Image (spheres, rainbow, N blue to C red):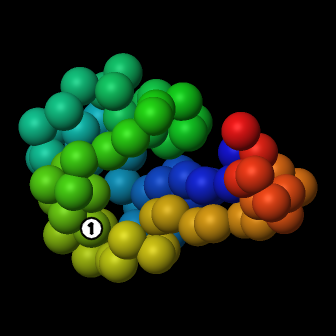
Amino acid sequence: MPVIVNLDVMLARRKVRSKELAEAIGITESNLSLLKSGKVKGVRFSTLAAICRYLECAPGDILAYELSDDDLRPDGGD
């Protein structure tokens, strides 16, 4: 997957537990776990903003883009 989720890295840097973040931003621990593992198809901007606000970081600290072989194909991999 070309979008990499580095939320676990930011949690470790800030010494924040997943449970604490989930409670603070109002989502379930299971949904946060799915987000951390990259097993979601999307994330609401409001959720991303709440995470960034709590962890005092920017979206780019949590999400990264990695070029994949499919991105290099003219049809976009479809």
Left or right relative to 74: residue 4: left
Q: Amino acid at mark 1?
A: Cys
Asked if 29 appears above or below 72 in the picture, the reply is above
Q: Is residue 57 in view?
A: yes
Residue found 80% across the figure and 60% down from its top:
74
Q: Nearer the viewer, residue 19 or 27?
A: 27
Q: Quadrant of the C terminus?
A: top right
Secondary structure beneath disc 1?
A: helix
Q: Quadrant of residue 69?
A: bottom right
Residue with the most extreme front position: 75
Return the x and y of residue 42 as percentages of the image width and height: 38, 41
Mark 1 is surrounded, within 10 Å at the Cα level, by few (under 14), some (14 to 19) or many (20 or more) other residues, namely some
Disc 1: which residue: 52
Q: Is residue 5 above or below residue 77?
A: below
Residue under the image location 72 percent in, 53 percent down: 76
Horizontal and vertical percent position of residue 33 = 44, 31
